[in-house]
């Protein structure tokens, strides 16, 4: 954790590992091998190599990329599930409800969801889209643009991974005193990667 927090280069490389989930499944193994090469030339190679071993054992061998790749997903987070859980538990209130209270809350939640579905079906919306929804859509476009650059051979895979690393590891929209902090990929990030990040094209 301290390496992630205190060393910017290592943090960016670790985020590139997170960004593997954004790649099409068939090129994830190739992306992983490229990141291992990056580790070898890193000043923090020893610690990062331990992470790479863990990643390979857990997320390439134990859990196959097909289970965690979100390349073809419209929504790439579990925010909706988290919001659903938070809303339901706020309805329950009690930390350890009895069975009857639990069933009552389930019925109330089902009724509320059915009501929203009817509204949506009629073309009405009970809630306004949140800023984070627009930010997520914008980020999805940035991700797709990078993938298209790779498919058109305008960027190498390692360049794509290092650019995608700017889009992961932080909230889509972070607020502080009413102001949001954007985490966009600038044109400079799309056009090149630093020498410490990108090896020579193979």
Image (spheres, grey):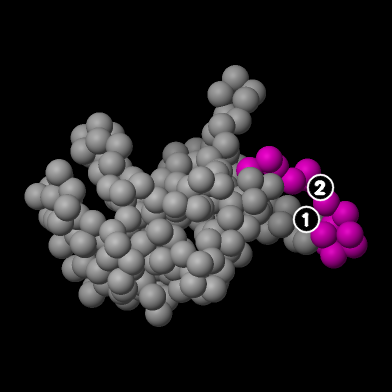
Above/below status of 5 relative to 184: above
Q: Which residue is at a point 50% across and 38% down the rendered structure image?
A: 94
Closer-to-camera residue (193/54)? 193
Task: Please check the rendered image and state whether residue 169 is part of the magenta-colored stretch, yes or no.
Answer: no
Closer-to-camera residue (42/19)? 42
User: Residue 126: which disc?
Assistant: 2
Q: Are marks 2 and 1 in contact (CB under 8 Å)?
A: yes
Give the left or right position of residue 69, taking residue 59 as reference: right
Task: Estimate the x, y position of residue 136 in percent, counting from the top left.
Answer: 61, 50
Q: Quadrant of the C terminus?
A: bottom left
Q: Which residue is at a point 65% across and 54% down the rendered structure image?
A: 137
- Specify whether residue 103 is in view: no
- Mark 2 or mark 1, which has the lower sequence index? 1
The residue that disc 1 covers is 116
Give the left or right position of residue 186, taking residue 169 as reference: right
Task: Estimate the x, y position of residue 59 in percent, counting from the top left.
Answer: 28, 67
Stretch in magenta = 118-132
Task: Estimate the x, y position of residue 99 in percent, counting from the top left.
Answer: 50, 54
> Mark 1 packing: few (<14 Cα in 10 Å), some, or many (20+)?
some
Above/below status of 181 relative to 190: above
Assign a secondary structure to mark 1: helix
Closer-to-camera residue (105/23)? 23
């Amino acid at each position: 954790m301290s390496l992630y927090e205190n060393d910017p280069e290592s943090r960016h490389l670790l985020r590139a590992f997170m960004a593997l989930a954004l790649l099409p499944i068939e090129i994830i193994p190739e992306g992983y091998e490229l990141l291992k090469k990056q580790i070898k030339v890193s000043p923090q190679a020893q610690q990062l190599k331990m992470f790479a071993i863990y990643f390979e054992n857990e997320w390439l061998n134990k859990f196959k990329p097909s289970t965690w790749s979100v390349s073809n997903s419209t929504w790439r987070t579990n925010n909706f599930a988290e919001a659903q859980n938070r809303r339901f538990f706020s309805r329950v209130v009690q930390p350890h409800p009895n069975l009857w209270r639990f069933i009552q809350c389930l019925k109330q939640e089902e009724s509320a969801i059915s009501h929203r579905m009817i509204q949506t079906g009629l073309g009405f919306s009970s809630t306004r889209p949140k800023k984070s929804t627009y930010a997520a859509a914008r980020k999805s476009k940035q991700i797709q643009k990078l993938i298209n650059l790779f498919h058109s051979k305008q960027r190498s895979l390692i360049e794509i991974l290092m650019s995608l690393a700017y889009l992961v590891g932080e909230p889509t929209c972070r607020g502080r005193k009413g102001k949001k902090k954007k985490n966009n990929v600038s044109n400079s990030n799309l056009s090149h990667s630093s020498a410490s990040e990108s090896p020579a094209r193979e």
